[in-house]
Image (cartoon, helix red, strand yellow):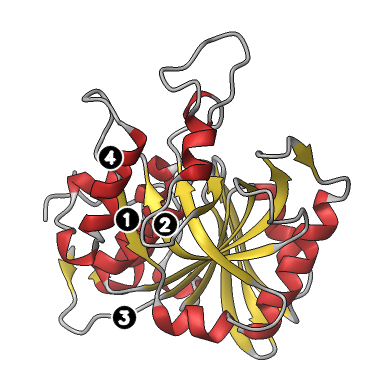
Amino acid sequence: MASSELILNPDGSVYHLGLLPHEIGHTILTVGDPDRVPKISKYFETLEVQKQTRELCTHTGTYNGQRITIISTGMGTDNIDIVLTELDALVNVNLTTLIPKKELTSLRIIRLGTSGASQSNIPLGSLLLSKTAIGFDNLLHFYPCEEHLDIPFARALQEQLGLNEHLNTPYVISANKELLNRFSTEGFVQGITATHPGFYGPQGRRIRMDTQYPDWNQQLESFDFLGKKISNLEMETAGIYGLAAIMGHQALSVNAIIANRKLGTFSEQPNAVVDLMIQKVLNLL
């Protein structure tokens, strides 16, 4: 491929992440906030890589003898497109010839994020596994992805929510079953996560501007497809699930519920909830 397509830095590292192939493990923990990276790596026995470019902070080390990479993505699925594509290139493209490898490597990608519940019966402090993710962004529509999507679910969303022609068609995609089963232990709940392309208007918040859908959160709360209801809102999960599925990687999103949008409440100890999530995930890897 042309050098303009997969751009490398002078040292041969991928353009945005600034990483070389030997600097990542095959288990990847993604977080939005770069300040959360050292809050995870402090539990590592060894720490061999510490790099940061822009909001993309990477630590690679070992936990219980397993080599793990933590990387911050920043917020939104546009950043997910960069991070997952470059992580895939590090293991599945020869960076000298820019030719994809014949034998491909599957990464295990686990998102550790914060989220707001959309149902009143999900208490603050819950740890929620995203069994299914709904993308209200348009990232996946740029890739051939239909074989991975739940089309009937997406159509039900369009019909029940009354989405107008100016919004993208939502896409619906599931977590990796193997990872979901591995993490389906006591202490986690499972749900359907709605990924939005913004924090304010797209998630129904009105500060000084009205939104096109003033009852958006109420519509999400009441949505029902074959008994399936939307449990929480955030900004990255659907993009991670979609790109991982297309490229042959395993992906799971773990959400620390620190807000309840239905009740209008916010956790008094959000950092403690996040730390609990980090420790449980590390111990289950």
State the CA–CA distance, disc 3 to disc 2: 24 Å
User: Tag 2 or tag 1, which sits nearer the N-term?
Assistant: 2
Q: Position of residue 46 (x, y in %)?
A: 72, 79
Answer with the quarter of the image where residue 67 lies: bottom right
Would you name the residue on which mark 1 appears? Answer: 172
User: Tag 1 or tag 4, which sits nearer the N-term?
Assistant: 4
State the CA–CA distance, disc 3 to disc 4: 36 Å
- Regarding residue 11, the answer to whether it shows in the image is no
Image point (77%, 53%), residue name: 124
Q: Are marks 4 and 2 in contact (CB under 8 Å)?
A: no
Image point (40%, 75%), residue name: 176
Left or right, 251 with respect to 81, comes to: right
State the CA–CA distance, disc 1 to disc 3: 25 Å
- Regarding residue 73, the answer to whether it shows in the image is yes
Image point (42%, 52%), residue name: 224
Q: Are marks 1 and 3 in contact (CB under 8 Å)?
A: no
Q: Nearer the viewer, mark 3 or mark 4?
A: 4
Q: Position of residue 205 (x, y in %)?
A: 59, 24
Q: Nearer the viewer, residue 63 or 144?
A: 144
> Quarter holding the C terminus?
bottom right
Look at the numbered disc 3 and give the secondary structure of its residue.
Answer: loop
Q: Mark 4 is on which residue type? A: Gln
Would you name the residue on which mark 4 appears? Answer: 158
Q: Are marks 3 and 4 in contact (CB under 8 Å)?
A: no
Left or right, 267 with respect to 211, comes to: right
State the CA–CA distance, disc 1 to disc 2: 6 Å
Tell me the tag on residue 133.
2
Q: Nearer the viewer, residue 122 or 271?
A: 122
